[in-house]
Amino acid sequence: MKINNNLKVIEKMAQYGYGEANGKVILIGEHAVTFGQPAIAIPFTSGKVKATIVSLEQHATSEIDSDVYRGSLAEAPEHLKAVVSRFIERHNVTQPIKITTETNLPPSRGLGSSAAFAVAFVRASYDFIKQPLSDETLIAETNWSEQIAHGKPSGIDAQTIVSNKPVWFKQGSVTTLKPLDLDGYMVVIDTGILGSTKQSVEDVHRLCASEEKYLQYIKEIGKLVYDARNAIEQHQFEKLAPAFNWCQKYLKLLTVSHEKIETILEESNKLGAVAGKLTGSGRGGSMIVLAKTLEIAKKIEQSAQKLGAQHTWIENLGG
């Protein structure tokens, strides 16, 4: 899934568009954010999606070339087909087109791959028709795409990816935060287990509607997000630990953890991890582990790989 920067062929075409976007990592507040509680997310700059749109000969058939699907637009998965068809219809695109996406963001891992695709595609589409694109329009289009993909998205992915800065998100409103300035490291781990955001979100809402205790877990996660923000504002890396660890306990009670996540967390703690939790919708997907030093972070990364993690990244939280 390497990203290429070869646009020479495209530049020779009569009409083309290009767009790109980073992924995101939710530090804390996932699931609770869909109930109106706050969440904190940061751009995941190690992950990127690049999209190109190229006009084809009039007799050709519109097509998509991506990691998840390669073939005609007519036969594409519903999510892809809906997003592309919306662009074609709304902007009266009459000629056939080819959409190509390249990414090193694994799908269905809680790293914002679907929102990153939407942002990259919308940017490419407006570049294709040579029209200006405001952040408001970009966020609105991305959220529409996310609704098709996830049913009840929080909107945090779109806001974080479009702003490309750490954000505080609550009930649809976003506040941009200062870059992180913490003395530590974050290991981002792709467990290799496919998660389903739509199913996880629906299940948690069903649980909360069935018993009051589950709704209380959501409220407790909300309180922990404020604790985490205080730790970040005071540049106290160690104070993130209890917020992360308690959040993970509540997420497990909400049935969105996974055996593999718990195993990797257990082994990471043995190696000196400060804290760890799932990130995103859970039940697989990705997780984040905090480490005080790069040496410990590397040991955690190696351990996770031995336990079957498909991808790992180490992010310096020092701003």
Image (cartoon, helix red, strand yellow):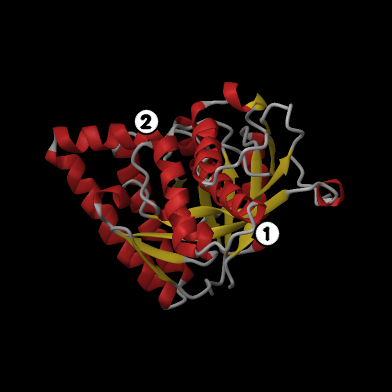
Dividing the picture into quarters, in which one does residue 88 lie? top right
Question: Which residue is pictured at 49% across the width and 42% down the height?
Answer: 266
Amino acid bearing label 1: Glu
Q: Is residue 211 left or right of residue 143?
A: left
Q: Position of residue 49 (x, y in %)?
A: 65, 48
Instruction: Examine the rendering and report whether any part of residue 297 can be seen.
Output: no
Q: Nearer the viewer, mark 2 or mark 1?
A: 2
Q: Residues within 10 Å of mark 2 (few under 14, many from 20)?
A: some
Say left or right for 55 vs 126.
Answer: right
Quarter of the image with the C terminus in it: bottom right
| Labels 2 and 1: the sequence-earlier one | 2
Q: Which residue is mark 1?
A: 295
| Residue 87 on image: x %, y % | 54, 43
Which one is nearer the viewer's eye here, 153 or 35?
A: 153
The residue drawn where x is 20% and y is 40% is 214
Q: Residue furthest bottom?
A: 234
Write the residue at 42% across / 54% down. Answer: 140
Do the numbered discs 2 and 1 sit on residues whose CB atoms are within 8 Å?
Answer: no
Comparing 229 with 11, the one in front is: 11
- Farthest residue to the left: give it: 212
- Element type at mark 1: helix
Return the x and y of residue 136 as percentages of the image width and height.
44, 62
Q: Which mark is residue 199?
A: 2
Using residue 297 as the reference point, say whether residue 216 is left or right of it.
left
> Is any atom of residue 305 visible in this view?
yes
